[in-house]
Amino acid sequence: MYKGGKIVSLIPARGGSKSIPYKNIKLMAGKPLLYWTCKAAKESKYIDEVYVSTEDAKIKEVVQSLKLGVKIIDRPAEFAQDTSSTESVMLHFATLIKDFNVLNLIQATSPFTTSEDLDQAIELFFENGWDSMLTGILYKKFYWTLDGKPLNYDYLHRPRRQEFEGVVNENGAFYLTKKEVLETYKNRLGGKIGVYVMPEEKAIDIDEPADWSLAESFLKKQLNNGKKKDTKE
């Protein structure tokens, strides 16, 4: 258990996906998509338990077949609809699993998340005294509304790129939420919110079939780089 208390991971994985049928268990780089996030969470130095919340029998079978020691939460059908919020899944989880201090929500559609990402984020979370945390990508770009209004800079005093802090785009890879924040706000974010910045290439979100090949290509590259690093060590 980490100094901040018990940390558990929750990976929502419902069976209904219209754009890519059963995408959570579709093979990516030779493994079911959700394998990669399950593996990252299980290999974290600080995460005590990992759960997959699903209503689908086929997904349950796949999770068990991974043999990673991931536990399954039976999700009621009412929380597995197209209109169901992720918060409803988190709150349902909290009614069943009460022994935790921080909930780490991980999206199965972000297979680039590594145990190193999780560990670094958790360390920052406690070092900075955050109550909740999101992940995002830092972009040093100027944004405008369609009706010609600047969103993140003063065009009369255009900053140089080196001096421009930029803005963070929430990429939804994973979140950290203290139990009391979830219970109080009924939301994954609340209180003192922190940001864990990830590399730009990890902004890929697998929603459409066109995203799949791009994501798989990057994941294979990431895995190959990891193997090369291990060989040198």
Image (cartoon, helix red, strand yellow):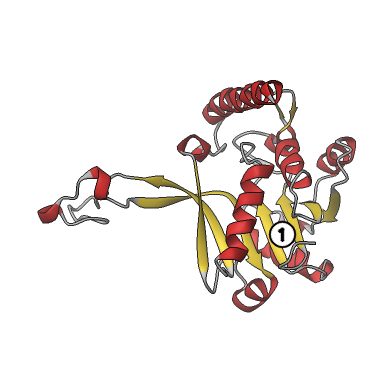
Q: Which quarter of the rendering shows the N terminus? A: bottom right
Residue hosting label 1: 79
Q: Residue 169 location, x and y as percent?
A: 43, 50
Q: Is residue 179 above or below residue 9?
A: below
**Side of 231 where 48 appears, left or right:** right
Q: Is residue 154 above or below residue 140?
A: below
At 25% from the left and 50% from the top, the residue drawn is: 163
Determine the residue located farthest toward the left in the rendered image: 156
Quarter of the image where one finds residue 223: top right
At 85% from the left and 36% from the top, the residue drawn is: 66
Pick the front one: 45 or 37: 45
Determine the residue located farthest toward the bottom in the rendered image: 184
Q: Is residue 104 visible?
A: yes
Question: How many residues crowd mark 1 within 10 Å: few (<14), some (14–19), many (20+)?
Answer: many
Q: Which quarter of the rendering shows the C terminus? A: top right
Q: Is residue 222 above or below residue 57?
A: above
